[in-house]
Amino acid sequence: MRHRVTGKKLNRSSAQRGALRRTMIVQLFENERMRTTRAKAEFVRRPAEKLITLAKRAQDADEDAMVHARRIASSRLGNNKEIIKKLFDDIAPRYMDRPGGYTRMFKLPPRTSDAAEMVILELVEE
């Protein structure tokens, strides 16, 4: 039984899952949309939205809280300074009036090689 078991394993070890999550979130923030399988999109969606919320809350905080939030985001995204800057300076202010739901998924036809369900995961435009 899967009672209270959260998350997806995606047939990978924990280190591989962490690297996949980091890479896909960076790609999402960099390009603001990505084409991937539905399972991977669902795997990445929640932590990406949590990072946007973290950056949003840091906008109203004092300087110490802003630095702390940037360090938390940096630890979760792998010290990618350009992406951290984009997240805090471009993406978070765009969603200041939005209470959540920063991403959307569009269904695509299945992939021809293995018939995997494909989606486009993108940041919502205001």
Image (cartoon, helix red, strand yellow):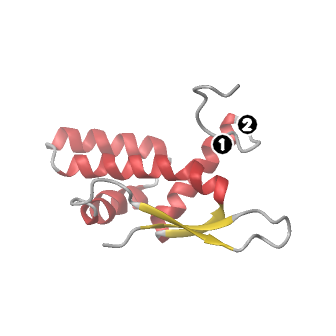
Distance CA(mark 1)–CA(mark 2) = 6 Å
For the question of whether residue 69 can be seen, the reply is: yes
Identity of the residue drawn at 77% across and 70% down: 111
Can you tell which mark lies on residue 77?
A: none
The residue at which mark 2 appears reads as 13
Please, is residue 33 above or below residue 70 in the view?
A: below
- The picture quadrant where one finds residue 17 is top right
Instruction: Give the percent coordinates (x, y) of residue 85.
Output: 34, 59
Q: Which amino acid type is marked by label 1?
A: Arg
Identity of the residue drawn at 51% across and 58% down: 26
Identity of the residue drawn at 21% across and 39% down: 65
- The picture quadrant where one finds residue 100 is bottom left
Instruction: Give the percent coordinates (x, y) of residue 86.
Output: 36, 63
How dense is the environment of label 2, judged by Cα within 10 Å: few (below 14), some, or many (20 and up)? few
Quadrant of the image containing the C terminus = bottom left
Q: Is residue 126 left or right of residue 23?
A: left
Tag 1 near tag 2, CB within 8 Å: yes
Please, is residue 26 above or below residue 34 in the view?
A: above
Q: Is residue 114 left or right of residue 99?
A: right
The residue at which mark 1 appears reads as 17
Disc 1 element = helix
Q: Which amino acid type is marked by label 2?
A: Ser
